[in-house]
Image: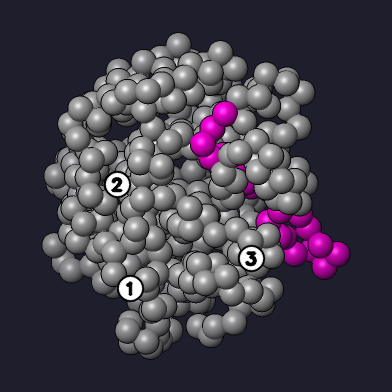
Amino acid sequence: MLVECSTAQQPPSSARKTIGRAGAVDTASVRGKVMCGYQGWFRCPSDAANLGWIHWSRDSRRIAPDILTFEMWPDMTDYPPAERYPAPGFTYPGGRQAELFSSDDPRTVLRHFEWMRDYGIDGAWLQHFLVGLPGGPEAAAYPSRLRVLNHVRAAARQTGRVWALSYDSAGMRLDRIFDVLTSDWKNMVDAKVVDDPRYLHQGGRPVVQIWGFYAGNAHDPMTVELAERLIEFFQAPGRYSAFLIGGGDWDWRHNPDPAWRKFCGRFGAYCPWNIGNYTIDASGLKHAATNNWVEDKIECERLGVLWFPVVYPGFSWDNLTREAPGKSLIPRRKGQFLWEQFATLSKLGADTVYVAMFDEVDEGTAIFKVTSSPPTQGHFVGYEGMPSDWYLRLVGEAAQRLRNKQPIPIEIPIQP
């Protein structure tokens, strides 16, 4: 998802980890949580799904530099041989065979949740795109998606992390959104998935997030009428009731339609998607645009809605959109781009944050372990020479400070 913008050698792993939250994370409230979006959509030939190079390549049958759909190569150092899938034609500097991972593997998902635990991240929002659910055009992949969901459930239990469903209506026909989404939610409730001991709740109700409340977006259609129907469904008393988090326009307060602004005030929480918004300073450096945050927070508090800000580490989707290398790049500035957003949230007293994303290498917003020495074939963006766990460390450090109400300085206080 993108909102058009307006304007070497590492020390031992144990030495690099942020001290995580002791024990299991509380599941009773979304407040005070720093969690990441988790796509879990990567597949490789001969994995459990056997769907081919899904989310790695435009052609599921093969992978090559000219058909890549991802921007960052994951650091595969911690993955044992059984979890590695050789990518034909790709080699690391020096000639060694390059490999990728599949999300449809319980060991890999557990590894990702262990990183969340070890670095002090509270958990994950598991993305469920409606196009891949029963009734959607890509429903054939649903069995694999369900396996990933169960891998997440097991991994959250083993690591004491929390998780919740995050539906996304991108690419779905307007007239199918309500039925497909609510049918899946009913299945999740009836199957007692949301009764999972690690599933996130608020006020005694399971939490559910929906991305898609964007005005005038042809790829992500939404109307006031549909938004109201969805809100009524989740707020109605009964077994399917939930604490609803709406995700949508970063400039929601400026929508000229008062009915649109009104329904935004009916969510339990509102999450403005800020990825792609930035400002440029006098020296030419890009900074995440946070100028809306103060008024967003004030308005949400006035409406009785939890303000749920989104932070991101940088951006790039040249391969995905077939652009020239570097054209879409929002540089990470070795972590300073992300850290400045946490510093601003610290001043605002925020402690509930959506980190976009954990494993999103397609759009270059991943915070999990990525290599800065990717294969020499094709265009890739790395971590600018920083350790592969640098962004896990930064998010964990910021989360700890926000929880403890400690000021976050504008400059990164830890060393690589």
Residue ID for mark 1 = 22
Q: CA distance from mark 3 to mark 2?
A: 27 Å
Q: Say whether residue 131 is magenta.
A: no
Task: Residue 324: give x, y in percent of width and height.
Answer: 60, 49
Say which residue appears at 41% left-offset and 21% top-offset.
Answer: 236
Above or below residue 185? Residue 284 is below
Q: Earlier in the sequence, mark 1 or mark 2?
A: 1
Res 136 → quadrant: top left
Q: Amino acid at mark 2?
A: Tyr
Above or below residue 101? Residue 57 is above
Q: Amino acid at mark 1?
A: Ala
Q: Earlier in the sequence, mark 3 or mark 1?
A: 1
Helix, strand or loop at label 3? It is helix
Helix, strand or loop at label 2? It is loop
Magenta segment range?
A: 266-290
Task: Residue 262: give x, y in percent of width and height.
Answer: 66, 24
Residue ID for mark 2 = 199
Q: Earlier in the sequence, mark 3 or mark 2?
A: 2
Residue ID for mark 3 = 346
Can residue 295 be seen by looking at this rendering?
Answer: yes
